[in-house]
Amino acid sequence: MIIDSHVYCFTPVDQPGGYASAAERMRWVQMATAGHQQHAFRIRDRRPSDSKVLAPLGKDLHGPLPDLNFRVDHDQGRTIWTIDGEDHTKYWFPPNLRNVEYTPHSLISEMDYAGVDVALLHTDPALGRDSAYLADCCKQYPERIYSMAPVDQWRIVNEPAAVIEELTTAINTHGLHAIKIIPPLGYLSSDEPWDDGPYRAFWEAATSLNVPVFFTLGWDSKKSDYTTESSGLEGYLQQLRILMRWMDRYPNTVCSLTHGFPWFELMQGDRIVLPDEIWEPFKNPNCNLEVCMPVRLGDLYDYPYRGCWPAMEAMLEHIGAGQLLWGTDMPFQNRFCTYRQSRDWIEKYCTFITEQDMALLMGGTCARILGIPTS
């Protein structure tokens, strides 16, 4: 069974998508566009430009955004903004996403063509916060699509009861299958570490739901969240230490880290160098790691991503295939390769992976985490 542990479905991003208004959601889309590593360009002549002009003024992420008529181009499936009468764009969303949406029907079509049996939907603030919509995606394709529940981390400290109720509804009423947590977003409202203190009531409720928790780790400062520049490898390692404290406090909860490691922070020249400390969390068998390289490294390495092979070997050695799960970030990985190639670079070219380990990596581990029968 082939299981993709990291995909998305989302409505057009200029629709509310679970927010109170479309404008509220578009604010998140503009911030994400501002900080993402993809290159921006002027549409008229495709000359490089700078998307950081879209970032909140004064580096206050709650502050006003620059008024650059940031909008959606439905026909070409992209966002556009205007500077001095000139339109600019950036393919954070991959080309050919008409209406800047990705439906469950589009996902299933890609899965069928690439031979993928099951996929797990992730969530992101820019892509919507509507648990009912995610549940409907699952209901349209039962036993093919599973989904995580969104959590507004930036609201946990000040509105814990409301966030807990929303999460409980997503899992117990809508029937979603996991919890998605992006700790950097918590730092937008509090400097407190996210494993305890003002977060304890939330975690007590979340872990009682008996579903896995998927973490997208980032950095430890309001000044460095997922919309801005990183605070370096040490910031990430500090977040791993917080994660280990969290696992000690909730020893019965299975978790996984999305996207793999912060690959750009690990580059030394053209090589990925993995420090010894990065393996520490995986000594706990409840901690798993996503193998998701093309979407993060596709602008550094060409298919079949030979530069990633040593890191793959190291993950198999230090973590083991039983705690590794394949993911793609579909449809975003289409910026660099086809969906089939996102399988092939591992299955055809990483010949050092044994048949047993390949079965775990490409589906078995994710099936265990989600409780999916593999017979």
Image (cartoon, rainbow, N blue to C red):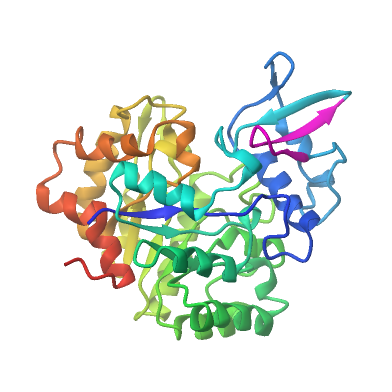
* Residue drawn at point x = 58 percent, y = 54 percent: 10
Whether residue 264 is visible, yes or no, is: yes
Query: Which quadrant is home to the N terminus?
Result: bottom left
Whether residue 76 is in magenta: the answer is yes
Nearer to us in this view, 308 or 332: 332
Question: What range of the chain is rendered magenta?
Answer: 71-83
* Residue drawn at point x = 45 percent, y = 73 percent: 246
Q: Magenta: predominant secondary structure element?
A: strand
Picture layout, residue 327 above or below residue 252 = above
* Residue drawn at point x = 48 percent, y = 66 percent: 148
Whether residue 320 is visible, yes or no, is: no
Q: Is residue 129 left or right of residue 15?
A: left
Quadrant in the picture for residue 21: bottom right
Q: Position of residue 327 (x, y in %)?
A: 37, 50
Instruction: Give the total number of marks visible in the rendering.
Output: 0
Picture layout, residue 298 above or below residue 356 = above
Nearer to us in this view, 347 or 254: 347
Which residue is the extreme one toward the top? Answer: 45
Q: Is residue 261 left or right of residue 206?
A: left
Quadrant in the picture for residue 198: bottom right
Quadrant in the picture for residue 5: bottom left
Q: Position of residue 79 (x, y in %)?
A: 70, 37
Which residue is the extreme one toward the left? Answer: 355
